[in-house]
Image (cartoon, grey):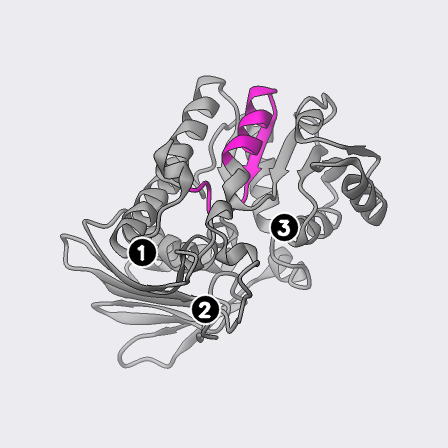
């Protein structure tokens, strides 16, 4: 792998624009192509960001031999198809979260990547954030003792009208896959896959969840209290409490600038991004996952140790179990 990694962007929505803007600030990344369902949107996106090639279909982008890795930025209802096209064409893939609509689709992508010895990673930027990585180091080193309680929430005020994708079952709508994936992933980053899953939700007339509470339990005694919402602007905070202390994240825990460590008998300690990581703080925060992808590609790694595929599969199994308990089903679940 050359020093400069050549990226293709699949889809042209808001998250694709944010990711591309961050990529353009990285000296070792080059955005060489974009692909969309039609040529017009691809051309507009290419002109906006100075991208040399615009493809009018996903398949054309996947077949572009000048692309090393494709960032899949579609709604999660299209992740299985879009990422699959790219993997089958020999491209490495960074796929947005939620990874897919369900665990079956996720397993299909992982099996395909492993069979082809191709790189695949879920774009769980939280796991790559330097502040979150520092927190996991502290927890692993016993700074707060044994983890007993994780709390996290992510809710938006809305309202979202009936035609919005977040209320459309055909597009994997609902709070859980768009927002709840963050609290669930945060809890499982620290505690792994839960042994017990309970959930309750209010559903929209279309049959997707708009307000969901989740209780996860582990046989070792830990619990996680999580929530997500399409009609309540929640604090969007998180905390991790152990037998010897507590870590608190302010609003925006999924891409934090800081956290505070509380331990009995000591003053609170604040941790922030340091050095080169602090120098990139003006970006959207997506540059860290891009940097991890490029590190893996240069090292010849097909999976990231920061965002392992088995972890992504475990999160999807939890999300499936939550949907089963609250009565949300998608057409893809029948496949």
Mark 3 residue crowding within 10 angstroms, few (<14) / some (14–19) / many (20+):
many
- Whether residue 246 sits left or right of residue 55 in the image: it is left
Q: Of the residues under marks 1 and 2, which one precedes in the sequence?
A: 1
Check if residue 90 falls in the magenta segment: yes
Q: How far from the left and from the top, in percent, is residue 8?
A: 70, 35
Q: How far from the left and from the top, in percent, is residue 327?
A: 29, 53
Q: Are marks 3 and 2 in contact (CB under 8 Å)?
A: no
Among the 4 quarters of the image, the one containing residue 142? bottom left
| Secondary element at image label 2 | strand
Q: Nearer the viewer, mark 1 or mark 2?
A: 2
The residue indicated by pointer 2 is 155
Q: In the rendered image of this protein, does residue 244 appear above or below residue 9?
A: below
Q: How far from the left and from the top, in percent, is residue 18?
A: 68, 54
Name, please, the residue furthest toward the top: 116
The residue indicated by pointer 1 is 141
The residue indicated by pointer 3 is 287
Check if residue 170 falls in the magenta segment: no
- Spatial CA distance of label 1 from label 2 is 31 Å
Residue occupying the point 63% across, 52% down: 15
Among the 4 quarters of the image, the one containing residue 41? top right
Residue occupying the point 31% across, 64% down: 201
Q: How far from the left and from the top, in percent, is residue 222?
A: 20, 60
Q: Nearer the viewer, residue 227 or 189?
A: 227
- Spatial CA distance of label 3 from label 1 is 27 Å
Q: Are marks 1 and 2 in contact (CB under 8 Å)?
A: no
- Whether residue 137 sits left or right of residue 218 in the image: it is right
Read off the magenta span: 80-101
Residue 129 in view:
yes
Q: Nearer the viewer, residue 11 or 253?
A: 11
């Amino acid at each position: 792998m050359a020093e400069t990694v050549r990226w293709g962007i699949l889809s042209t929505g808001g998250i694709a624009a944010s990711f591309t803007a961050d990529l353009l600030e990285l000296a070792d990344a080059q955005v060489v192509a974009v692909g969309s369902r039609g040529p017009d949107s691809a051309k507009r996106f290419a002109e906006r960001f100075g991208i040399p090639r615009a493809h009018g279909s996903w398949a054309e982008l996947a077949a572009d031999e000048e692309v090393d890795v494709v960032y899949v930025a579609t709604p999660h209802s299209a992740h299985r198809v879009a990422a699959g096209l790219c993997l089958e064409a020999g491209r490495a893939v960074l796929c947005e979260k939620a990874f897919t609509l369900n665990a079956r689709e996720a397993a299909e992508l992982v099996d395909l990547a492993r069979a082809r010895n191709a790189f695949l990673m879920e774009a769980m930027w939280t796991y790559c954030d330097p502040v979150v990585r520092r927190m996991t180091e502290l927890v692993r080193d016993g700074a707060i003792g044994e983890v007993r309680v994780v709390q996290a929430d992510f809710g938006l005020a809305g309202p979202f009208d009936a035609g919005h994708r977040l209320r459309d079952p055909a597009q994997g709508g609902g709070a859980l896959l768009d927002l709840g994936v963050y609290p669930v992933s945060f809890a499982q980053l620290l505690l792994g896959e839960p042994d017990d899953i309970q959930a309750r939700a209010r559903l929209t007339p279309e049959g997707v969840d708009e307000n969901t509470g989740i209780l996860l339990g582990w046989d070792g005694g830990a619990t996680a209290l999580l929530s997500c919402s399409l009609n309540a602007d929640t604090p969007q905070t998180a905390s991790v409490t152990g037998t010897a202390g507590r870590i608190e994240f302010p609003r925006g825990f999924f891409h934090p600038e800081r956290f505070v460590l509380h331990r009995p008998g000591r003053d609170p300690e604040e941790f922030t991004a340091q050095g080169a990581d602090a120098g990139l703080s003006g970006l959207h925060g997506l540059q860290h996952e891009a940097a991890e992808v490029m590190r893996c590609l240069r090292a010849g790694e097909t999976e990231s140790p920061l965002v392992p595929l088995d972890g992504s599969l475990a999160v999807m199994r939890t999300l499936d179990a939550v949907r089963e308990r609250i009565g949300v089903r998608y057409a893809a679940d029948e496949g």
